[in-house]
Amino acid sequence: MKLYIPDCFDLASTLESGQAHRWKYENGWYWGVIYGDLIKIRQSKSGLEIFSSLGDLEKLKSLIHCYFRMDDDLDEIYEIIRKDDYISGAIDRHYGLRILRQEPWECLCAFICSATSSIVRIHKNMESISDAFGKSLVLDGHRRSTFPTPEQISASGEDKLRELGLGFRAKYLHCASIAIAEGSLDLGELRNLDYWDAKIELMKLSGIGPKIADCVLIFSLDKLEAFPIDRWVSRALEKFYFDDGAPNYQDTVEWAHDYFGCYAGYAQQYLFHDQRLGGLHVNGVRHRK
DNA sequence: CCACGGCCTGATTC
DNA sequence: AGAATCAGGCCGT
C-alpha cells in the first residue's frame, strides 16, 4: 500500500528518536507491530510504502495516520516553539520528526523498562515480553509478536518478568498490569483529564515518577505539553537555558510551558534527539558524553 | 524541600 | 580479557 503523506514528515528521525521501542530497521524497511499488526514501512519521495500481516488496508491507513499524528501541523508548531537559535537549530536538523501516538499500555511498559537502563536493553526487554506473552505474527517470513495485554502479563507474575531480564522494574510492571487489568486505572480515560490531573493519576502507580509519566502522556495520551526531562534534556537545558543549573523537575516543566507554550513537548523531543545525536556522534566519530 | 544510597543486569568502557 | 562503570528513574530514609 502506498500512502500520501504531508511534506513535513521524516520517518527515520521519527522512529529513531527514542520514543518507540519495537521498530527494527533492516535493508531499507522499518519493521514493527502496531495495533496487533506486523507491518513493514519505508519512506520514498512520493509517500509511505506499507505492507501488513493482516491486510486490512483501509483500516491500516487510518491507523497509520493516527499513529504518526499526521494531523499535527508541524509548521505551525515550529512557529510557536521556535524561540531561540538553539531550538531553531534542532528543528532544522531534524525537520519532519513527529511525536508518535502510541498505544498507551505498551508505551507505559516501555518507559517502566527505561529506568536506569539503555536503549538497547529496553528494546530487548520489550521483545522478550512480547515473545513470552504475545501472539505470533508473520510477514514476508519475518516473525514478531504482539505486545501482550495487561491481563496476559498480570496472569504470569513478577518472577517471570525478572527471568526476562527486567530486574527491579519487574515489580513495577507487574503492579501496573494488575492495576489496569482489575480496572483501578483506565489509561484511555486519562485523555479526558488535563495534563496535571492525568499525571497525578499515573504517578499513583509505584515506579512511575514525573519523568516516566511525562513520557507516557506525550507519546501516547495526546498531552503535547508534557515535558519529559531526562539526562539528555537536562544537559541541553543547563547548556542553553540555565547557567546556574535548572530548577526542580516541576518548576522546569512550568518554565517550559511559559517559554515554549502548549507544544513544549515537541520542543523537548527536538532538544532530546539533537542532544543525543550530538553526544553520540561528533564529526562522524562515536564518543562518550 | 534537597541529598543520598540502593535497586537488577547487560552493554560499554578502560 | 576481566573488572569497573554506566545506563532515557524511582523510592525510602
Image (spheres, coloured by chain):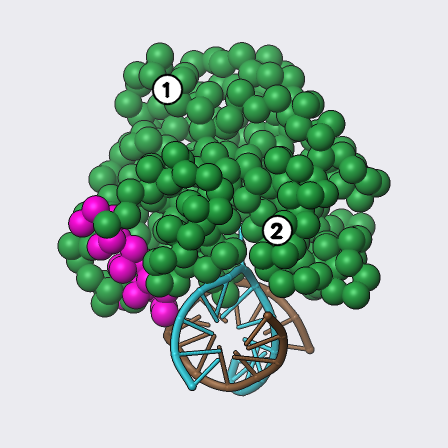
Chain colours: A green, B brown, C cyan
Residue identified by numbered label 2: A253
Q: Is residue A270 visible?
A: no
Q: Is residue A282 highlighted in magenta?
A: no
Using the image, determine if residue A155 lies above or below residue A183. below
Report the residue marked by disc 1.
A60
Could you tell me which residue is drawn at 31 percent across and 25 percent down? A53
- Give SS at disc 1: helix
Q: Which residues are magenta?
A: A163-183
In this view, A216 is above or below A31: below
Q: Main secondary structure of the magenta part?
A: helix
Q: Is residue A176 left or right of residue A24?
A: left
Q: Position of residue A117 (x, y in %)?
A: 49, 63
Question: Residue A67 placed where, x, y %?
Answer: 45, 28
Question: How far apart in space, not on screen, are marks 2 and 1 (Cα)?
Answer: 35 Å
Which quarter of the rendered picture does the N terminus of chain A lie within? top left
Q: Please state the horizontal and vertical placement of residue A116, each as a whole percent of the image.
A: 50, 65
